[in-house]
Image (cartoon, rainbow, N blue to C red):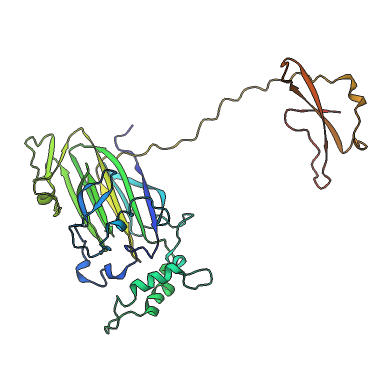
Amino acid sequence: MSDHPDKITINAIARDFRADHPDFETDRFTLWNQDNLRKPETGIVQVRLSADGKPIYNLQHHHLSTSGQAKYFDQWYRDVPGVNKSFVYPLVLEHTGDGNYKFESRSFFPLDGEQETFGTLYEEIFDSQHQLTPIGRKAIEKNEGVLKHQDGRPFSWEDVEGRFRFDDRSKQHNYHFTLEAVTTFTYQGTEYFKFYGDDDLWIFIDGKLVIDLGGLHESAEQEIDLRLTNPKNRAANKSTTLVLRLREDLGIQQADEYLELVLQVGQQYDLRMFYAERHTFDSNCCVYTSLHLKSVPETTPETPPDSTPDIPKPPQFIPPFIDTITFDSFRNPKTDIVCVTPIRTIVRREEEITIIRRVRKVEEIEASPACPVNTTELS
């Protein structure tokens, strides 16, 4: 078997959110409103994961692109009834040669066509009669007056509603979702990991933040060099160990000065990816890596059990008084049949009695009358 399978499949979890959530579809968080949000907003999350393996909201950070409340951020990657809906999404990385893999989507909408979601943006904002829903009213209310026209006039209620109603893209995709992918890899000493896209993206390796691309920004990219030959490698033995300081070497500004990522050849580590698409209309998600990420096993059809030869049934014992049995009405041999079946008694299992059943054909059914399973027709 090749050391490089044709593809790597990671069962990610996609969570669908509504447009009225405080952290989603909020214009004051966007790059169109503030030039300083054209670039990623670093520092939204802490450098370590929570006890249940989720990003921790950084309360020490001055937040520009989130609501500023941890209770809302804590919903991004957890199942919360009434707030989000979760779905399994197979994140498939294709082998591109030389041990490299990629997942590349310039129109990343994993919940399109999925049943039981909140639907497209238009379906959230408007009902079947094209009237505003309660969700739609909340979404417009929080965005009214935020964006401005070229002449400086703020967007009115009608302006915001028109963006939802008349832009065809609102009907095409299911926006407002997060994606969580958890996998492992065995470190080889020659790897890299790169991400390109928008919106928020955080990568944790061995429980430490190594890529920080938070915020509702233009598509951005970041690559981490995980090779032993990385010039920044601080390990004493650079032939077997990689040591990088998160703050100085990886640019994680909220990290402690001496916090390090330590990888040893042959050891297994976990990698966690947290992604979010929070505002219309673009969505890009591209992953490039040479890490040998663990793939979920492919499902194969179950092998059907070996067929066993039919065992002939013993002949039915027909009591001699069968011909004396009467029915509640005249029996027509062409339309009525008689079925018999053995039933073991409760008192003596070795004895059998015979139940006589009559099955009357329903006239609307053209098929011939038949006896139930495990019974025998008596002519």
Q: Residue reaching furthest bottom?
A: 151
The quadrant where residue 155 appears = bottom left
Front residue of 302/340: it is 340
**Could you tell me how many numbered marks the image carries?**
0
Q: Is residue 111 above or below residue 192?
A: below
Q: Quadrant of the C terminus?
A: top right
Residue 278 appears left or right of 310: left
User: What residue sits 34% from the left and 63% below the top?
Assistant: 24
Q: Is residue 76 above or below residue 29?
A: above
Residue 137 at x, y percent in the picture:
42, 72
Front residue of 113/177: it is 177
User: What residue sits 49% from the left and 73% below the top?
Assistant: 131
Front residue of 224/119: it is 119
Residue 377 at x, y percent in the picture:
81, 29
Front residue of 83/294: it is 83
Q: Residue reaching furthest left?
A: 236
The quadrant where residue 362 appears = top right
Residue 232 at x, y percent in the picture:
9, 46
Q: Residue reaching furthest front?
A: 347
Residue 143 appears left or right of 130: left
Q: Quadrant of the N terminus?
A: top left
Residue 7 at x, y percent in the picture:
35, 42
